[in-house]
Amino acid sequence: MPYNKVIAAGEPFQLRFKGNLDHQLKLVVRNSMGITVLTPKIDNDQFLFDFPKNLIRKSGICHWSLVHNAKVLNEGAFDITPNTALKTHIESYLGPRGITAVATDFSTHVISPTDAYDNPLSQGTDVISTFQFQDKINTTTLEINNLLAWTSIYAPTQAGRILVTSSCNASSSKELTTIVYPGNGTNFKIDFQRNHSFADGNQIITFFTSDIKDANNNVISDGTLVHFLATNSKGLQLSANGTTLNGVANARFLHPYEEDTWSVKAYITGAAVSSPLSVSFTAAIKDYDITPSKTGRTITLENILSFMDQIVPDGLPVTLQLYDEQGVYITRIKETSRLGKIGFTLPREYYKSGNYKIKANVAGIVKEQMITLQ
Amino acid sequence: MKMNRNLYRAFLLITFLTLNGLILYGISSIWSYLNTGADRKTMLHLPAQLTSNYLPKVNWSPLNNDGRPMELQTLQELERDYIKAWYVKNNALETNNHYGVNDYYTDSARVKLYKVLDHNKANNISVKTTTIEHNPILNFYSADGKLAVLTDKNVQIQEQVFVDNIMLLKRSYESSFQAMLLLEDGFWRVRHLVEIENTPVSVSKDQSIPQTVLSEIRDIKGLNYYPRENPWNMFGKHFQDTVIDSDFSKIKSLGLNSIRIFIPYEGFGKTTLDTDKMSQLQRTMDLASKNKLKVTVTLFDFYGDYSLADWTLTHRHAEKIITALKDHKALQAWDIKNEPDLDFKSRGKQNVLSWLGQMVKEIRKWDNNTPITIGWSNPEAALNLTTELDFISFHYYRKPKDFLASYNALQDAINNKPIVLQEYGYSSYDGIWNAYMGSEEDQANYYKEMQTMITNAKLPFLLWTLYDFTEVPDNVVGRLPWRKSQQQHFGILDNQGNLKPAYQEIIK
């Protein structure tokens, strides 16, 4: 349908009809936000329809039908364009609000300026999008297409904040921010720190990473989880986690009880891995004595001394295995040391009198001995 | 004096008790009010359960939008909320109530709608409107997935404008819109909705039904079919394909070539089609094909709401049945509704006719090769919508001697479209309710008279019906026993399956 008229939003609009008609005359008006019916005012011999503000302020096509007794006498439409003479309001959106400093990542700046009556501005209107990062300020001129103008702001190679603003028809928007986070970490190194190298099962060894950085040399975000994995000479694995602070994460392990060599690696899952690190522990405990009681029912392992001949700290795990004369395995008893010794009791109710072989293991030092239980 | 005093005491006592009762009631009301909190899940602001109350056809153009590539899941959510936005707007325009508008329009957009509603409310204007079809194109989707722009072209709209409850205008038209939607609290809300210039889609092909198909209509000799044991309730747990198969082969052996069956709207699950019943319908069609019978499928049986709000739902129901059956060999015609003219009085003639007219258009969108008709209850009603339909069907239960006159009048008014006598018949009921005045001979005489006229006029026919029925549901002819008893004896076979004399008059 050709539009009889194009008006700017908010301009008063009237329709006048002449004719031999009565009060049954109505004007049905519709736009995208609804349908309504107007009643005429009579002005001499004319019927005058004054369009209410809400109708003439809504941009887009506005249709009218002149109706009399359920019959359409005439109809038409007019196009209401956004009114740019009045102040323009800028509605802008920026998202995502957090991106990473990787060349492929970006935020989209969407600007949908409206006129004073909240109508989106016409196709082709110029909009200026500006963003600042560090000491650079970039300005792009865009055109409104499909109710809005948009541009993608690609991430710089450095972490920081991008501030964005826009303007249109001499109106400016507020400032929007997107934070540029460092990218994923790259491979790194690890090192350790310990009080001594003895496997006393008592001291703590701390592993820490080098400064972990992304591909563009930005220190990775604080709180990145680093997973440390230590594999001992028997192939058993120990693990601990640490989170980064200023690019460095650390994790603590307890020294082993016996002589051992660990191979340690740290991972940022899915992103980066450290070079392996080998750590050796020397034996802290060199020897001990096995002293059975007279009846043989109590076996004491004593004189368990550590690297400076000090009494080993309490809590050293000790095992005692019991075999019969033929060497058939009977049982295994676990205890922990206290004041450098451990007593094992072999009650009569369980173990009949006779000859047995015992095998003790303290910090990897295995000793065998025959005993007689009475 | 003593009497008075007792009365006085009783009065005081009762007043005291009542007053105490009231006070206790008041306190307990306040107490229980203070103990009822808001339903916790209201904090979540969940969208209302998506019931099937508005289902216009939505045809997305292939995705080729600016910005971020659209995900299928998001597109579905966007469509759901955009269509809901139309739904709440339509609802609001009908009731002038703000209900639901908050959820689907942003703060500044809803104000514009409210102003229209306020004006309409003050002037007692209400608008019933529905959209039949949307053709959106996605223009833009932002990188953060929170903003989208779409162009909705050629939206088909139906509208009825009322002032002081009197219909001022009724029309249907097409419009195009551009909409910007924002994702806010889990809802895609309309931020801008602008009407843009509409370019009508040119109607491409000739939609007329080929003459060969129509000549088959002119050869219809058949009957309206229901099984003997479960009339008006053919599908569902009573469905027995062996019974239907033997009935169909019986119909074929009688020398007939066509049947008419009925699909109840609610019984088939409205918009969510009952898959079991649908497969039974398929099976019925297959059996008809096996027995070389053609089938006129009557849709919307027992449907009676023609309001605009219900249109899109009936369209989806019909779409599912029609797309499933349209290529079936046994399919002869679509009968949109059985005797819709009986609803003219209660639902408004215009409402019924516009619903039917739109339904014809919709059916042609899905199936362009099957003729469409409507089973009007009498020859006079059959003058409605003649240009839209491919052939005209009418029912005749009046006296045979008036038949020719009514038929000729109908024929004169319709140029050159086939006319089908889609239902006729006579009850052989002989019992207390008609004072033992009926008989199987009367029925035979009726058919003798009718068949002569039908043969002479070369009129295609579908008689009512194969069997006498033992049970007639209440929703068919009501509860009254004299009506029910009549309805039980329209068969050309009795309820044991024996031939009645009428049979000899039809099958020669």
Image (cartoon, rainbow, N blue to C red):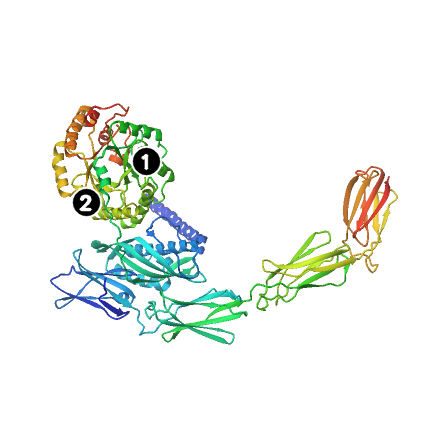
**In x, y percent, where is residue B56?**
32, 51
Choose between A66 and B508: the one closer to the eye. B508
The dot on residue A344 is none
At label 1, the amino acid type is: Met
The dot on residue B285 is 1
Disc 1 from disc 2: Cα separation:
28 Å
- Name the residue rendered at 27%, 29% in the picture: B252
Choose between A18 and B19: the one closer to the eye. A18
Q: Residue B452: which quarter of the image?
A: top left
Which chain is indicated by disc 1?
B
At label 2, the amino acid type is: Thr
Q: Is residue A281 left or right of residue B329?
A: right
Q: Residue B404: which quarter of the image?
A: top left
Q: Is residue A56 left or right of residue B71?
A: left
Which residue is under mark 2? Answer: B386
Which chain is indicated by disc 2?
B
Crowd rating for badge 1 (residues with CA inside 10 Å; few <14, some 14–19, many 20+): many
Q: Secondary structure at mark 2?
A: loop
Q: Is residue A221 above or below residue B283?
A: below
Quadrant (top left, top right, bottom left, bottom right) of the N terminus of chain A:
bottom left
**In x, y percent, where is residue B486?**
22, 30
